[in-house]
Image (tube, rainbow, N blue to C red):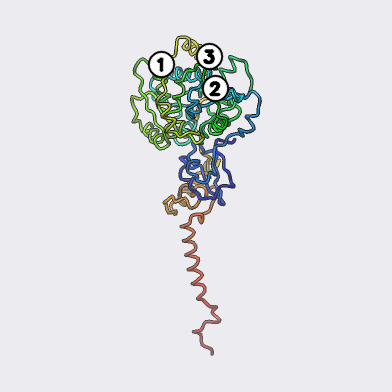
Amino acid sequence: MSGGIKIRESRCRGCANCIKSCPTEALRVIDGLVRILPDLCIDCGECIRSCKDKAITVNDDEWDLIKTREGLILMADPTFYVQVGAYSRPRLMKEALEHHGLRDLSEWASLAFDLAAFASARLIRDAGDNLPYISTYCPAVIRLIQINHPELVGRILPVESPLETAVSIWREETGAEESVTLVSPCPAKATLVRNPVGREQSSLEYVVSVRKVIRDLLACNVKVTGTKTKAISRRWLLWSISGGESRHISSFFDKGFTSISVSGLRNTQDLLNELELGRLSGVDFIECRACDLGCIGGTGTYESRFLSQLRLDNIEAEWMPSGEEMEQIRSWYDKDIWRLTAPVTAKERLPLSKDIKEAMAKLREMDAIYAELPHIDCGACGRPSCRALAEDIVRGQGEVTDCVFKLRERITNLSGEIKNLSSKLPHTLHPGRKRR
């Protein structure tokens, strides 16, 4: 199944700059073109950032085609609402969208994010020895845990993404059956639609990047007043920045809530490593975002993440829901609509062989090949590391001479052998032999 990353082969030069950026070694450069191993890709978007030729991009649907659909419904990530200063509040953006004949689900999104924070607070309070829990909001982090930190999957908070929950609530309240398009800031969120974790099928049907929709809105320069739509809570917009989710959850605690929030893949991996080593005692909740500063740093956004952060820092959010809002939250909480329908499980790497004896033999062969490689992980072979090359060789997807150092060694040996052979003559023509 396709994920959130797309390769434009016509732009790829086979430079191999991208393969070193992948945290799960999911990229290869074969025959001059980059290839993705779908079983290892977490759709974090680091390869998109490292590709200067723009050969790697977000795998979204054709916005020019989708926007022609009558009665188009958008479920936008909170990041979408802080991209443009003129539309930096949900009701202003809603008015701009309606001018184009588009509808968004921001009212239901506000409720869904409140519900997710409330449910998370309840689970954390009742967790006992299973703390700290890990946020499920960033799909790239969840996939990173499944592949690189499988022993931590039991700590993943079983709360559905509020982007999915908002659509479910909207359908139940209105009885609507129209298709919903996700406006995503990154390739990781695109996988919510195509390959969701914790549920069999997404409630969303299409996905487009924040950048494409914002460009369309700005091209028309629609003037908005904010008087045509009712005010919508803005606390859920803070989920698009690192620490926003934790702050929202903490509003449902009187006291005694301790959380750690990090952004960026390097910080995320460091934190998960420390959690594996048992160094985070006393922490209740971990919020990790794969992108720098949070979702506003996604590769599918339009605005500078620093300007988006400035807008979010200046948002006045009323963190505690009103009495009427709390009634709604508790009502939907009792319906369990916020809970993941399937457990998040570890993702096993493709075995070397289905037969255990053969797999062990191939593992020994891989170790032997790896021992002969230079161990400098230069990437010239099109693999991110010497270990990855050794694995590909054992799987029949590469050769030792793919390594430029082993190739040079082979050429040197062959040239020496050729020189040695060229100095030899048949014994019948040996010049030192005298005739009788």
Q: Relative to 369, say whether 86 is above or below.
A: above
Name the residue located 45 percent from the left edge and 25 percent from the top edge: 239
- Please give the residue where the numbered disc 2 appears in the rendered image: 94
Of the pair 217 and 422, the residue shown nearer to us:
217
Of the pair 251 and 420, the residue shown nearer to us:
251
Q: How many angstroms separate mark 2 from mark 3 (CA)?
A: 28 Å
Q: How many angstroms separate mark 3 from mark 1 (CA)?
A: 19 Å
Name the residue located 49 percent from the left edge and 38 percent from the top edge: 45
- Residue 320 on image: x %, y %: 41, 15
Query: How many residues crowd around disc 1 within 10 Å: few (fewer than 14), some, or many (20 or more)?
Result: some
Visible residue check, residue 193: yes
Task: Say which mark, if any, is on residue 340.
Answer: none
| Secondary element at tag 1 | loop
Mark toward the viewer: 1 or 2: 2
The image quadrant that residue 68 belongs to is top right
| Secondary element at tag 2 | helix
Query: In the rendered structure, which amino acid carries the disc numbered 3?
Result: Lys
- Please give the residue where the numbered disc 3 appears in the rendered image: 335
Q: How many angstroms separate mark 1 from mark 2 (CA)?
A: 28 Å
Of the pair 28 and 106, the residue shown nearer to us:
106
Of the pair 385 and 73, the residue shown nearer to us:
73
Q: Name the image quarter holding the C terminus.
A: bottom right
Query: In the rendered structure, which amino acid carries the disc numbered 1?
Result: Phe
Mark toward the viewer: 2 or 3: 2
Query: How many residues crowd around disc 3 within 10 Å: few (fewer than 14), some, or many (20 or more)?
Result: few
Query: How many residues crowd around disc 2 within 10 Å: few (fewer than 14), some, or many (20 or more)?
Result: many
- Residue 243 on image: x %, y %: 40, 26
- Please give the residue where the numbered disc 1 appears in the rendered image: 252
